[in-house]
Image: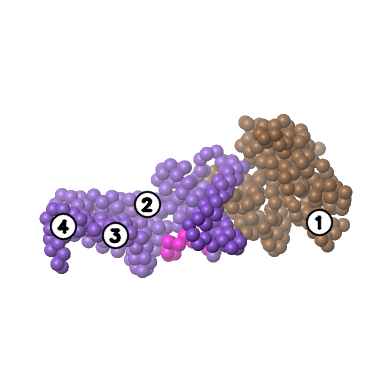
Chain colours: A brown, B purple
């Protein structure tokens, strides 16, 4: 079997005040898989994501991205390989124009200036936002902002795409458009969400996290149908929604 | 709101002035302003020529005169105090329409108003013909420290975000019947200001994380080639060079 896109073993993290947020996390994601990470508020999902790009750390455990272990010396390489799309696009888009924002990542990772334009074009094409290059992020609609935020990460050509609550604050059309964009990508995806129908739509496999531990792992459809697990982890399907 | 035009001061256009690279215009404006400032106030003719130069650029840039006048109006509070100088100044007095005014004060007032107007006028031309992202990039190319350019850029980017956050907080307060009538009731406004500060601070942290996640290492990377051919420099610098010629003549006379 080939090297997995992500392998996390024995990862724990305790905040300085003694709160244990991550507790011996074990998670392996194979290349090309789309995995949803589900769990109630405060389960440690965002803390986990910040570990994947080495912004938080210091606890025991090991993270490998496509065979490269996360260490101080490999931090840059890991951040190139893991593309994290933040929950609030206003946090992600900080440059004066869309072009500059999308070019920011690849330029940091050493893509020469002559190739940047092509990178930016490809990334914007993948999210259906070609033509928005010179627009200012605050003049985009919520859905457009979300797609440009995704483009800023796609431009880095990550091995693992990580999205934090990508469907929040989107109208149904924006939500569907984003799902279509995600479906068209061949990158490995880890999607953190409370939106269970969205998880089912985008991801074949789901992992449930609660109180810092991985408590369930399986095919999304099967997991959403498992009432005991769902109830134990404060997961609820929208009324009238039947996963099977 | 849509389209690429990123700020209210900009007048969209395709004039030669619009097309000059931002860094050329920045250098030209700075050169012009310095020439104006070092010119002695008594050489009234020099200021008239400066004014004509600016008007020529205005016409070339196809800027509507009304727009420019409105923008130049921001100098009014600053030059207002200059109007007191003729009354307060000492030395020889002269009679102007029945008022006894100080001659030195009159010159001082003229100095402030003339130089202020020319300076503001030239910056209005700059911002009316240049998009803010280009201005920021121009500052970077002129070796203004990257940190300062980045701070200016963040200010432009997040002014609207923080502003809308503030207006949401005010709406939320008004929705719960908050309408301060006396000074003791404005406490809640202070609390809102504090909350806004904390929120902005936290946003700053999240933005920084998002930058780190995309490989930020403390320095803004160069993002696109942006040539300024010698011809552009020649065109752009013709105005400040003319101004310097006038300034030196005025100093020597």
Which of the pair B199/A26 is nearer the observer? Answer: B199
Of labels 2 and 3, the one closer to you = 3
The answer to whether one can see residue A67 in this image is: no
What is the distance, in whole Å, between disc 2 and disc 3 at their CAs?
28 Å
Image location of residue A107, percent across then percent down: 55, 44
User: Crowding at label 4, few (<14), some or many (≥20) Cα neighbours within 10 Å?
Assistant: many
Which span of residues is magenta-colored? B3-14
Is A99 drawn above or below residue B148 in the view shown? Answer: below
Residue at mark 3 shares a chain with residue at mark 4: yes
Tag 3, which chain? Answer: B
Badge 1 element: loop
Badge 2 element: helix
Of pointers 3 and 4, the one earlier in the residue sequence:
3
What is the distance, in whole Å, between disc 3 and disc 4 at their CAs?
17 Å
Image location of residue B224, percent across then percent down: 50, 49
Residue at mark 2 shares a chain with residue at mark 3: yes
Image location of residue B54, percent across then percent down: 30, 61
Is B219 drawn above or below residue B20 in the view shown? Answer: above
Q: Which residue is mark 3?
A: B80
Q: Quadrant of the C terminus of chain A?
A: bottom right
Q: Residue at x 81, y 61 (%)?
A: A239
What is the distance, in whole Å, between disc 4 and disc 1 at their CAs?
83 Å
Q: Which residue is mark 4?
A: B102
Q: Residue at x 61, y 53 (%)?
A: A89
- Picture disc at residue A237: 1
């Amino acid at each position: 079997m080939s090297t997995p896109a992500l392998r996390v073993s024995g990862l724990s993290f305790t905040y300085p005040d003694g709160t244990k947020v991550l507790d011996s996390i074990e998670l392996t994601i194979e290349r090309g898989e789309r995995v949803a990470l589900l769990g109630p508020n405060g389960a440690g999902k965002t803390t986990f994501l910040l570990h994947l790009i080495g912004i938080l750390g210091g606890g025991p455990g090991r993270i490998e991205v496509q065979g490269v272990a996360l260490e101080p010396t490999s931090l840059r390489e890991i951040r190139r390989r893991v593309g994290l799309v933040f929950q609030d696009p206003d946090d992600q888009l900080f440059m004066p124009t869309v072009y500059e924002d999308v070019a920011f990542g690849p330029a940091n990772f050493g893509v020469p200036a002559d190739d940047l334009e092509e990178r930016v074009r490809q990334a914007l094409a993948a999210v259906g936002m070609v033509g928005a290059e010179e627009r200012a992020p605050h003049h985009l609609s919520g859905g457009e902002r979300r797609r440009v935020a995704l483009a800023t990460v796609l431009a880095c050509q990550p091995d693992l795409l990580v999205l934090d609550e990508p469907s929040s604050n989107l109208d149904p059309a924006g939500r569907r458009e984003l799902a279509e964009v995600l479906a068209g990508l061949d990158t490995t995806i880890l999607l953190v969400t409370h939106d269970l129908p969205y998880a089912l739509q985008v991801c074949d496999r789901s992992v449930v996290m609660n109180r810092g531990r991985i408590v369930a792992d399986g095919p999304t459809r099967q997991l959403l149908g498992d009432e005991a697990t769902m109830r134990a982890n404060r997961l609820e399907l929208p009324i009238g929604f039947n996963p099977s | 709101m849509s389209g690429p035009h990123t700020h209210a001061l900009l007048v969209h256009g395709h004039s030669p002035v619009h097309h000059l690279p931002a860094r050329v215009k920045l250098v030209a404006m700075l050169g012009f302003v310095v020439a104006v400032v070092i010119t002695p106030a008594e050489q009234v003719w020099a200021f008239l020529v400066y004014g004509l130069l600016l008007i020529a650029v205005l016409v070339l840039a196809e800027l509507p005169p009304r727009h420019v006048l409105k923008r130049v109006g921001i100098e009014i509070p600053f030059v207002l105090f200059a109007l007191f100088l003729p009354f307060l100044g000492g030395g020889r007095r002269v009679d102007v329409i029945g008022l006894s005014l100080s001659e030195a004060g009159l010159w001082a007032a003229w100095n402030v108003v003339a130089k202020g107007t020319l300076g503001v006028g030239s910056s209005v031309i700059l911002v009316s013909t240049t998009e803010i992202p280009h201005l920021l990039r121009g500052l970077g190319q002129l070796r203004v420290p990257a940190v300062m350019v980045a701070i200016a850029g963040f200010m432009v980017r997040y002014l609207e975000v923080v502003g809308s956050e503030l207006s949401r907080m005010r709406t939320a307060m008004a929705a719960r019947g908050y309408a301060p009538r006396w000074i003791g009731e404005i406490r809640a406004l202070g609390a809102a200001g504090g909350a806004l500060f904390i929120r902005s601070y936290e946003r700053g942290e999240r933005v920084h994380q998002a930058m780190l996640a995309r490989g930020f290492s403390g320095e803004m990377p160069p993002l696109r080639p942006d040539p300024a051919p010698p011809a552009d420099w020649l065109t752009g610098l013709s105005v400040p060079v003319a101004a310097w010629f006038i300034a030196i003549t005025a100093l020597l006379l």
